[in-house]
Image: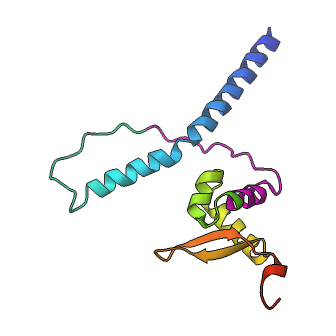
Amino acid sequence: MSDVIAGLRRDLEQRLKDIERDLAEHEPLLREREQIQAALAQPPFATGERPAAVKRAPARKAAAVKRAPRGANREALLQAVDQRPGASATELAGVTKISRAVTYNTLAKLVEAGKVEKTELPGGQIGYKPATPAESQPGL
């Protein structure tokens, strides 16, 4: 009988992990909603009316994030830069589903290694494009 209970416990724990992983995908939307609500409560958007109470999800422990295999983020970013030359780091993070912090860090390493080049975009933003091969660069 204890084998049956142990099996049910394992199944329930696995289901809980699956649910926590799925909920983690919605964390950015919940944070954005809170930021927008806070902005609407400030002048010039504030109307004097109190916004309807929004029921918040109870706080929970952060789900363990499974790490990508070694080099996977680097390869994903190189592929995204090849497909979208001139894309900003934020755009690349969104396309690859890699956190912005990891995207910025990895792009800096790729620029340093000569695999990717920075390019200035209209409006002063920085974009990234595949590096020009050394033999086609004048003076090298």
User: Looking at the image, which residue is at 64% across and 69% down?
Assistant: 128
Location of residue 26 with respect to 3 vertically, above or below: below
Q: Position of residue 27 (x, y in %)?
A: 52, 45
Give the image quarter of residue 60. Answer: top right
Which contiguous range is marked in magenta?
Answer: 57-81
User: Looking at the image, which residue is at 64% across and 42% down?
Assistant: 63
Q: Nearer the viewer, residue 8 or 122?
A: 122
Q: Nearer the viewer, residue 2 or 7?
A: 7
Q: Position of residue 72 (x, y in %)?
A: 79, 54
Q: Nearer the viewer, residue 45 or 16?
A: 45
Q: Position of residue 39 (x, y in %)?
A: 31, 57
The answer to whether 86 appears left or right of 44 in the picture is right
Quick one: quadrant of the N terminus?
A: top right
The answer to whether 74 appears left or right of 43 in the picture is right
Quick one: quadrant of the C terminus?
A: bottom right
Location of residue 84 with respect to 134 vertically, above or below: above
Give the image quarter of residue 119. Answer: bottom right
Q: Nearer the viewer, residue 135 or 10?
A: 135
Q: Position of residue 74 (x, y in %)?
A: 76, 60
Residue ranking furthest to the bottom: 139
Location of residue 77 with respect to 64 vertically, above or below: below
